[in-house]
Amino acid sequence: MKQFFPLIREEWQRFRAAMRFLTARMATHRLTQVAGSLSFTTVLSLIPLLVVTLSVLTGFPVFAKFQTEIQQMMLENLMPERMSQVVMKQITQFAEQSSKLSVLGGALLFVSALLTMGTVDRVFNDIWQVRRRGLLRKNVLVYWAILTAGPILFVLVLLLGNYFVDVLKAWPRVEVALSLVVPFLVATFAFSCLYVFVPNRKVAWKDGLVGGAVAAVLFVVLTQSFTAIFKTFQVYAVLYSAFSIIPAFFLWLYVFWLVILFGASIAASLPILKYERWRKVPRAGDDLPEALMILYILYQAQRSPSRMVSWSSIQTQLRLNSEDLADIMNKLQEHGWIGRVRRPDDSTGWALICDTGEVTLAHLYDVFVFDSQYFAAQAQKHELPWARRFTDMHKSGHHRIYLSELFEQR
């Protein structure tokens, strides 16, 4: 018993420290300000997004037969009933007007939807701290896939869930349970896909699912809360009539984006919590041992038949989160020491592409600890009389050892 309480206390302290880390990380990402910005962007681009979504769905005969039901079902699962009635009426009018657009107008509408997806992409990459953005061609293809395949998958899941609810109407308790579980599962699926596919970084499905589940719980609570608020404050609705929906809709959009960004922040933070890198105190030269370890792993892989190592294998061996690993790998790749290679079977991995007999420890030291060239330039700028001697001493030190010699030592 005496050993039990200290263990509980230690775990509680770890939990509190992890929560402080998450709170600080979310504050760094300015989730509240970003949610407000995205809410404004959504208001401007909501109609193009929905028109594109509905045009994709109605382009398939099986969906065209149920256009009204699909629209109603999507809104009922996305927002409170009273709000969805007003929004649905306006969307129907806009959709009818959009059918009269010319080819140029339709193209501009689709470009507007793509630009909105680009804004979301930038926000997600900031949360995952991605410094190297994807190619424009690749990003456009991803946005295109989300705008076309996304609505189809989403509606298919909704239709499947509603089908099971209708089949099980003979069992009222099961029907009630499914009516609560299905929206949660659909929301989890949608949010998880968003967290896994949008960032320009490999996100593990388990991390995406955890973040998606957290966001789904908050989303269900959000929808139920707004429904209760609409029922409670009837005087406000009577006083402002249809205009009461406007501020409520703006508030709902803001909280909706806050939920999405909160789930994204959870998904992005899980690898850091998993490897407990958040407990490490930053020090100069922290990345040098990891960089050497990556090069050593790839050096050993040269003797294997594949001659390359997967990203996940490197991450597992080093116990690094994706953000820290990507920073180190990008620096090594920029200096031409490692590269991404592809096998004939289209599988990809990382390999050593430099001659370890020409790369010295000093080269890595300059990149990850002390940039002697930058120091020399700054010293010359400030006319430091001892700068040249300091640089010469640095270059003539023990860092002149070659990587091939270092890796072959036992």
Image (cartoon, rainbow, N blue to C red):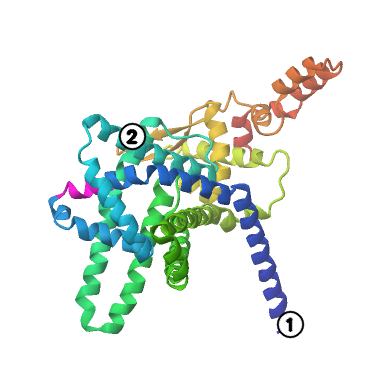
Residue 105 magenta:
no
Specify the quadrant that holds the C terminus.
top right
Expressed as whole percent of the image width and height from the top left, the position of residue 183 reads: 35, 66
Establish if 60 lies above or below 406: below
Q: Nearer the viewer, residue 217 or 302?
A: 217
Looking at the image, is mark 2 or mark 1 earlier in the sequence? 1
Q: Secondary structure at mark 1?
A: loop
- On the image, which quarter does residue 129 sit in? top right
User: What residue did someone put label 2 on?
Assistant: 111
> Of all residues shown, which one is farthest toward the front?
239
Establish if 318 lies above or below 7: above
Q: Nearer the viewer, residue 247 or 321?
A: 247
Specify the quadrant that holds the N terminus.
bottom right
- Give the numbered dot on residue 236: none
Expressed as whole percent of the image width and height from the top left, the position of residue 334 reads: 54, 28
Residue type marked 2: Val
Residue at figure coordinates x 46%, y 73% from the top left: 232
Residue type marked 1: Lys
Q: Secondary structure at mark 2?
A: helix
Q: Residues within 10 Å of mark 2 (few under 14, many from 20)?
A: some
Establish if 107 lies above or below 43: above
Residue 56 magenta:
yes
Establish if 49 lies above or below 228: above
User: What residue did someone put label 1 on?
Assistant: 2
Front tag of 2 and 1: 2
Q: CA distance from mark 2 to mark 1?
A: 65 Å
Magenta part mainly helix, strand or loop? helix
- Seen in the image, is 347 located left or right of residue 8? left
Q: Which residues are magenta?
A: 53-60
Residue at figure coordinates x 47%, y 64% from the top left: 218
